[in-house]
Amino acid sequence: MADSRPVYLNLIKIRLPVMGIVSLAHRASGILLFSSIPFAVYLLGLSLESEQSFVDVRQLLNQPLMLILQVVLLWSLAHHFFAGLRFLLIDAEIGIEKSNARAGAWLVLLAEVLTLLLIVCGACS
């Protein structure tokens, strides 16, 4: 007789392939981008009220914690964009073989890191 009890899966010990990591990060980045919309709209509205409020928003965005949040949102945007392109190609049955899917996932990770570095280094200079 087969045991029909639920199986306990320790998600910490399960080692996901790079394709699974990219997929989970795509979902997380989408949630992060969506949840940041109200804050972005609030800051936009605040910055459009007057010249002083624009200066206040700029000062707020130059705080160290806000700079870290901006980098995280930038990563989120870059990852969501490149992973979304990868998933569109997979929907068109391009890159669905295991080796091509793995290479595509690594390309997504490489493209998001390069994009993040280019933008952050460009903003620093």
Image (tube, rainbow, N blue to C red):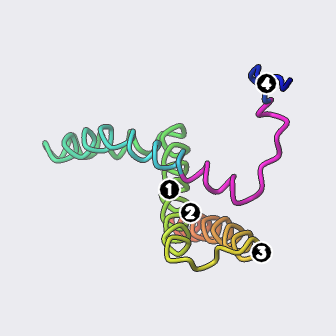
Q: Work out whether mark 2 precedes mark 1 in sequence or the reverse, and give the earlier one.
A: 1
The foreground one among 124 and 28 is 28
Check the image and report above or below for 99 versus 32: below
Name the residue furthest top.
5
Identify the amino acid type marked 3: Ser
What is the CA distance from the residue labelled 1 to the residue labelled 4? 36 Å
Q: Which mark is residue 74?
A: 1
Judged from the image, the secondary structure of the residue bearing numbered disc 3 is: helix
Magenta span covers which residues?
A: 10-26
Q: Work out whether mark 1 precedes mark 4 in sequence or the reverse, and give the earlier one.
A: 4
Q: Is residue 61 magenta?
A: no
Name the residue furthest bottom.
94
Q: Which residue is mark 4?
A: 8
The foreground one among 35 and 74 is 35
Contact flag, marks 2 and 1 (Cβ < 8 Å)? yes
Judged from the image, the secondary structure of the residue bearing numbered disc 2 is: helix
Name the residue furthest front.
1
Q: Work out whether mark 3 precedes mark 1 in sequence or the reverse, and give the earlier one.
A: 1
The residue sitting at 41% across, 44% down in the picture is 61
Q: Which residue is mark 2?
A: 120
For marks 1 and 4, give the one nearer the viewer: 4
The residue sitting at 64% across, 77% down in the picture is 95
The residue sitting at 74% across, 22% down in the picture is 6
Query: x, y percentage for residue 103?
Result: 73, 74
Q: Which residue is mark 3?
A: 99
